[in-house]
Image: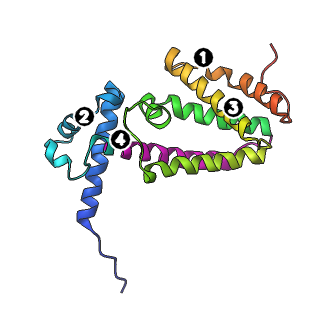
């Protein structure tokens, strides 16, 4: 007869409550902005008194930390899947990575701001929360090396180009695709500069 392992139901309930608190914080951030997240507001949304919240998170920054780690863990999982199915042609692979990051970024303004901008004064993610972002970067750099882009300055430029287009999209055409449509053109310019082989991504005018 098999014996099931003992379940720590108290730990499970505690983890479920933490997830509920983080979900409530995201809801506030998406509705009113990241700065609007307060312990009182979060507690009210989950039906809890503010002092009780401290048994799960000792500060507002601790909630931001959990949100940060959750967001990067989600992107890591998606990036791993994306990197496994990249096209063989270097330029097409470059565009595929760019479009994947772009779409993830513009899908959620509050999430993008917390992940990639210093939008919360005084907030510094913990080592544990920061770890998924480090793993994303390691996997991304390895993918760029496989494509033939190995110089650190070139990789920095690529990241700046992608981030700049995301910022322009979110600031000037939220919900649209004005700057996403620039990705093939920008990736061709970058690929030309670093001498990546392959036919142009842009359609002839």
Magenta-tinted stretch: 63-89
The residue singled out by tag 1 in the image is 178
Say if mark 1 contacts mark 2, CB within 8 Å. Answer: no
The residue singled out by tag 2 in the image is 38
Apparent side of residue 143 relative to residue 25 in the rendered image (left or right): right
Q: Which of 141/23 is in front?
A: 141
Q: Quadrant of the N terminus?
A: bottom left
Residue 4 forms part of the magenta stretch: no
Confirm whether residue 140 shows in the render: yes
Q: Which is in the foreground here, disc 4 or disc 1?
A: 4
Q: Quadrant of residue 40?
A: top left
Labels 3 and 4: the sequence-earlier one? 4
Residue 86 forms part of the magenta stretch: yes
Residue 154's tag is none
Labels 3 and 2: the sequence-earlier one? 2
Say if mark 2 contacts mark 4, CB within 8 Å. Answer: no
Q: Position of residue 9 (x, y in %)?
A: 25, 65
Characterize the magenta stretch by its predominant secondary structure. helix
Q: Which of 118/55 is in front?
A: 118
Alpha carbon distance from label 3 to label 2 = 37 Å
Alpha carbon distance from label 1 to label 2 = 34 Å
Alpha carbon distance from label 2 to label 4 = 10 Å
User: In the rendered image of this protein, does residue 10 appear above or below residue 128?
Assistant: below
Q: Quadrant of the C terminus?
A: top right
The residue singled out by tag 4 in the image is 64
Residue drawn at point x = 45 percent, y = 42 percent = 71
Say if mark 3 contacts mark 4, CB within 8 Å. Answer: no
Apparent side of residue 139 relative to residue 34 in the rendered image (left or right): right
Residue 157's tag is 3
Labels 1 and 2: the sequence-earlier one? 2
Is label 2 in a helix, a strand or a loop?
loop
User: In the rendered image of this protein, does residue 42 appear above or below residue 145?
Assistant: above
């Amino acid at each position: 007869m098999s014996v099931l392992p003992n379940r720590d139901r108290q730990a499970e309930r505690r983890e479920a409550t933490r997830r509920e608190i983080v979900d409530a914080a995201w809801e506030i951030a998406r509705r009113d902005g990241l700065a609007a997240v307060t312990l009182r507001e979060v507690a009210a949304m989950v039906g809890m008194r503010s002092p009780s919240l401290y048994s799960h998170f000792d500060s507002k920054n601790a909630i931001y930390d959990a949100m940060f780690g959750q967001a990067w863990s989600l992107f890591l999982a998606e990036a791993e899947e994306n990197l496994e199915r990249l096209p063989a042609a270097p330029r097409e692979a470059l565009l595929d990575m760019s479009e994947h990051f772009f779409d993830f970024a513009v899908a959620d303004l509050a999430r993008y701001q917390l992940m990639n901008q210093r939008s919360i004064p005084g907030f510094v993610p913990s080592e544990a929360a920061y770890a998924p972002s480090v793993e994303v970067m390691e996997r991304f750099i390895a993918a760029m090396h496989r494509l033939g882009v190995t110089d650190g300055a070139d990789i920095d430029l690529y990241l700046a180009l992608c981030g700049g287009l995301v910022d322009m999209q979110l600031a000037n055409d939220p919900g649209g695709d004005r700057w996403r449509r620039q990705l093939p053109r920008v990736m061709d310019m970058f690929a030309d500069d670093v001498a990546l082989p392959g036919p142009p991504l842009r359609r002839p005018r």
